[in-house]
Image: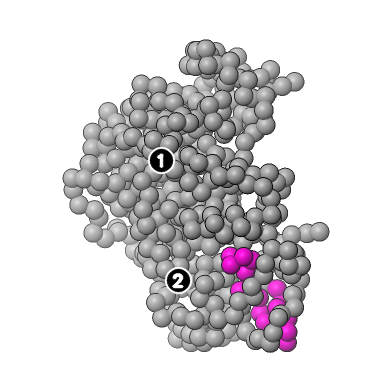
Amino acid sequence: MGINDRLPAAFRERMEELLGADGLRFFASYASEAERALFVPAGRCSAFERVCPFPVERIPYLPGAYRFDCPSPGNQPLHHAGAFYVQDPSAMATVSAAPLRLGMKCLDLCAAPGGKSVQLASGIGCYDGGTGFLVSNEIQPARCKVLCGNLERMGFANLLVTNADAKRISAWYPSYFDLVLVDAPCSGEGMFRKDPAAIAEWSPSASGYCAKRQAMLLAEAAKTVAPGGYLLYSTCTFAPAENEQVVLAFLDAHPSFAPCDVPEALCGVTVSGVGLPSARRWYPHIAPGEGQFFALLRRTPDGEPVASLPFPDARLPLTAEEAYAVQEFLADTLLSYADLSLCAFGRARRIAVCPFPVPPENVFAAGVTLGTVEKGRLVPHHQFFKAFSERFLRKILLSPGDPRVAAYLSGAEIPLDGPASGWGVVTLAGLPLGGAKLSNGVAKNHYPKGLRLHA
């Protein structure tokens, strides 16, 4: 039985009414395979194209996006190195609509599994030495763990991962962010081709239930937008009740916000919103992708941004023992470290580089975790190698095709090209894979067991 035969009758009727004669093309698109694409962060595209071992083709209307031909991209060494993130091209369109610039402060309110957070972090410069700051939030702890892993793999630094509800986030960050993304939970109609289970879970009443939650999320998110800042709303459904009607009701209740146009390149592969021309609808029969709705809104510039955040900072000063262990470790490991904002965090007293205040609860990750001090020594965390690879004194520079790449990713020791001793970072095509302890001509593997490839 094909997917069109399984589509709910109520869904078919609504889409036929919405699309008119174009409905035939819409339903015909369901007979083809779901589209996938890669997102490559800013500044990595040229290097990625030079070393990528499988065919890729740039998508001209989506910055950093590529079509690709590879059956298991997640097993590719470049994926482990953080060279790319696999994502539906229509999902990429949402963040592509945002006027991102380096140094912005952003919030991704409903962030898991992390594709849009990766795009945001790339666009605002959340790397070592960058000035962008991202709060990536996910209310479900299990999904938050996946979110952390994806952001860690990509090597980002200046971000906070939380699992708080929207009201807590708005209380912590009033009028603070330059851009807030609400990729709201929805009835998932844009997932029908990609995930057949979404069809079984759909019901005619789902949109009404989802719309109430979406309205709440949008209202709370609005409280966190700084004067002159942007609010970006998106879903992966086609239902007007969850899309345009939610946005129009929000605009009626929030006169300080107004709709904005999106880049012209996106208009060529989308259609105008229903009763809201500035909003955009992505349909699978118009451009490859599963489907997306997005609307960009801007708050009037009247008013002042928040002067200080209204929560007690959870960052803790290092003890004398911790400070000595960290100083000894960094002096032997990095080229420079005087500029790093060091603190302890949480009950486990993780040592972190965190230049921004940290809320007192519901925090999964803050800044970059260096590690923990055990018996007077710093035991480094995987994120330390991923985020600060450019600063390392010792680098094991591997190229695609080097057999040591597969050996390292499977957890084995790898031989060194010369004598060295101490902690080092293993890189692939200049991008960090992870850490190793160098001694006696070999690199002892410290790639996390849960991430290793198995033959």
| Residue found at x 57% / y 70% | 385
Quadrant of the image occupied by residue 300: top left
The answer to which of 292 and 222 lies nearer the viewer is 292
412 to the left or right of 29: right
Which colouring convention does the figure follow? one colour
Location of residue 274 (image quadrant): top left
Q: In the figure, 320 relative to 293: above or below? A: below
- Badge 2 vs badge 1, beta-carbon distance below 8 Å: no
Q: Which residue is mark 2?
A: 353
In magenta, the rendered stretch is: 425-445
Q: Secondary structure at mark 1?
A: loop
Q: Residues within 10 Å of mark 1 (few under 14, many from 20)?
A: many
Q: Nearer the viewer, residue 267 or 179?
A: 267
Q: Amino acid at mark 1?
A: Ala
Residue 272 visible? The answer is yes
Circle 2 Cα neighbour tier, 10 Å, few/some/many (<14 / 14–19 / ≥20):
many
Residue 409 visible in the shown view: no
Q: Which residue is mark 1?
A: 97
Magenta span contains residue 428: yes
Tell me where residue 268 appears, x and y as whole percent. 45, 31
